Amino acid sequence: MTWWKKLFGGPGDSERVDYYQEGLVLLREGKFHEALTSFRLALKESPGDPVVLQQIAIAYTRIGMTEEATKTYRHVLQKDPGAPGAHYGLAYLLLHGGRESEAATHLEAFLDNAPVEAEAGEHILHARSTLARLRGDVEADTPLSSDDHV
């Protein structure tokens, strides 16, 4: 791992490491603990960066540290109240914890400021359908789900 080389030296240790990009790759590979380490190193280089903090919250969620993920999302929202990713992630954590009303508020905030990138489409549809279920706009038989979209 690049961060390992950076800590202990080795070939190429004079090169600047992009810990954020490294963390994204590790997250996609399912190496959540390693991703968390890379994101923490990225945060040292850019303290308080809401984008890095959101990725840390995602890594926490994936390894089951939901309280830490919730705190991290809330921290992002203190820095950037309109951060759609933080609203989205927090909504599903709250939903999983049975806090449907608060989850709905965050889903609405996400949809009010939803990203326009094509890859966000799946998350937007998921948020709309979850919000519709929470409001009772669909059949009661449809179970609420926190899915793994966080």
Image (cartoon, helix red, strand yellow):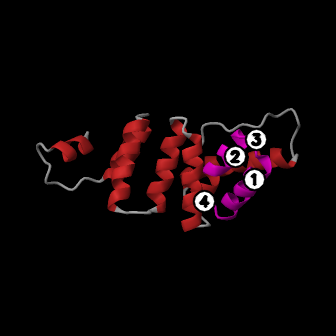
Task: Please identify the quarter of the rendering in which residue 126 is found.
Answer: top right
Q: Residues within 10 Å of mark 4 (few under 14, many from 20)?
A: many
In primary-sequence order, the first of circles 1 and 2 is: 2
Tell me the distance, in whole angstroms, between the alpha carbons under discs 3 and 2. 6 Å
Q: Are marks 3 and 2 in contact (CB under 8 Å)?
A: no
Q: Is residue 78 rendered to the left or right of residue 96?
A: left
Q: Is residue 19 rendered to the left or right of residue 63?
A: left
Residue at which label 2 appears:
94
Viewer-proximal residue, 123 or 150? 150
Look at the picture and state if 42 lies above or below 122.
Answer: below
Q: Give the range drawn in magenta.
A: 89-116
Quarter of the C terminus within the rendering: top right
Q: Is the magenta stretch mostly helix, strand or loop?
A: helix
Residue 84 - label = 4
Residue 126 in view in this figure: no
Q: Which amino acid does label 2 sit on?
A: Leu
